């Protein structure tokens, strides 16, 4: 299976071009649209979201992960093998949180270049053909060079910021909820939020934090938008009032 994780936008013409290459080079392999509306250019935020998503997928899933504001510059393209899953994308930190948390990892630089390579669309011309090869079960050794370490790394630690806003206005953060106690109180946007296990446990218009289905701390409001009510956006900083790290 191929899983696409990008900031290309669901309504634009870029995703379709990438899929055309994948279907050409890996016919019959299922292609899953995991995300295409990630916050534009926010590499560190996407890196934390990607790290949280990976464990939900089976071994040998190939992730084509692209949030690449430096496309056409000096950054390399890379392949990572992390706990049995493949990731293909830019060496700009996007894969680094998942790599830092992995128990088993392999890293390679993509040294191959196709006959036609757009300066601004490596997702289609460079990353997609490599990902398609991996999805078919073939390791493209001639296209890769072993890499001792990533050029850009954000580390394994959590990120005390909002990393994603869903269409409900729920704010997903880069903080893992385990082992934060239910008594912890979260400070964000000038408010102090308590914990609720579910949306239904919260009163009307009452913001709260909970552990979402990815195991991340999420800020929500029962049947309303936390982003609107609290005036928060991706990148908004938060802290545990109790001094938790």
Image (cartoon, grey):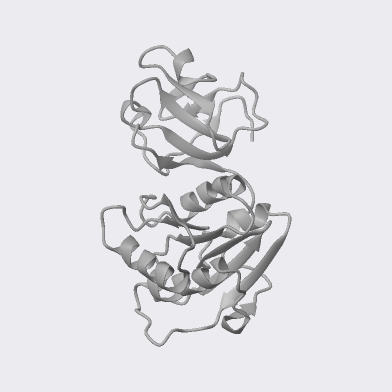
Q: In which quarter of the image is residue 119?
A: bottom left
Left or right of 120: which side holds 241? right
Residue reaching furthest to the right: 103
Q: Which residue is drawn at 35% across and 16% down?
A: 205
Residue 90 percent across, percent down from the top left = 49, 67
Q: Which residue is drawn at 37% across and 56% down?
A: 7
Q: How many marks?
A: 0
Q: Above or below — where is 56 with respect to 231? A: below
Residue 103 percent across, percent down from the top left = 73, 54
Q: Above or below — where is 40 with respect to 189? A: below
Left or right of 120: which side holds 141? right
Do we see residue 43 in this rendering?
A: yes
Q: Residue at x 60, y 79 (%)?
A: 144
Of residues 141 and 138, the one nearer the viewer is 138
Left or right of 92: which side holds 73? left
Residue 153 percent across, percent down from the top left = 59, 61
Q: Quadrant of residue 85?
A: bottom right
Residue reaching furthest to the bottom: 115
Of residues 189 and 216, the one nearer the viewer is 216
Left or right of 172: which side holds 233? left
Residue reaching furthest to the top: 203
Quarter placement of the C terminus: top right
Q: Residue at x 37, y 13 (%)?
A: 204
Residue 239 percent across, percent down from the top left = 54, 33
Do we see residue 70 in this rendering?
A: no
């Amino acid at each position: 299976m191929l899983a696409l994780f990008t900031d290309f936008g669901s309504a634009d013409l870029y995703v379709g071009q990438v899929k055309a290459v994948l279907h050409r080079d890996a016919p019959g392999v299922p292609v899953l649209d995991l995300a295409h509306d990630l916050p534009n250019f926010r590499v560190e935020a996407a890196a934390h979201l990607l790290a949280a998503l990976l464990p939900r997928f089976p071994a040998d899933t190939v992730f084509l992960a692209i949030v690449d504001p430096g496309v056409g510059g000096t950054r390399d393209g890379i392949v990572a093998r992390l706990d049995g899953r493949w990731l293909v994308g830019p060496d700009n930190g996007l894969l680094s949180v998942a790599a830092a948390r992995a128990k088993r990892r392999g890293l390679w630089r993509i040294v191959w270049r196709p006959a036609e390579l757009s300066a601004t669309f490596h997702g289609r011309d460079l990353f997609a053909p490599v990902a398609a090869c991996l999805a078919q079960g073939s390791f493209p050794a001639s296209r890769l060079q072993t890499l001792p370490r990533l050029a850009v790394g954000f580390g394994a630690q959590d990120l005390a910021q909002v990393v994603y806003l869903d269409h409900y206005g729920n704010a997903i953060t880069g903080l893992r909820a385990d082992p934060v106690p239910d008594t912890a109180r979260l400070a964000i946007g000038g408010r102090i939020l308590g914990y609720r296990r579910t949306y239904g446990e919260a009163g009307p218009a009452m913001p709260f934090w909970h552990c979402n289905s990815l195991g991340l701390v999420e800020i929500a409001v029962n049947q309303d938008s936390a982003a609107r009510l609290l005036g928060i956006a991706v990148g908004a900083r938060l802290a545990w009032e109790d001094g938790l790290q």
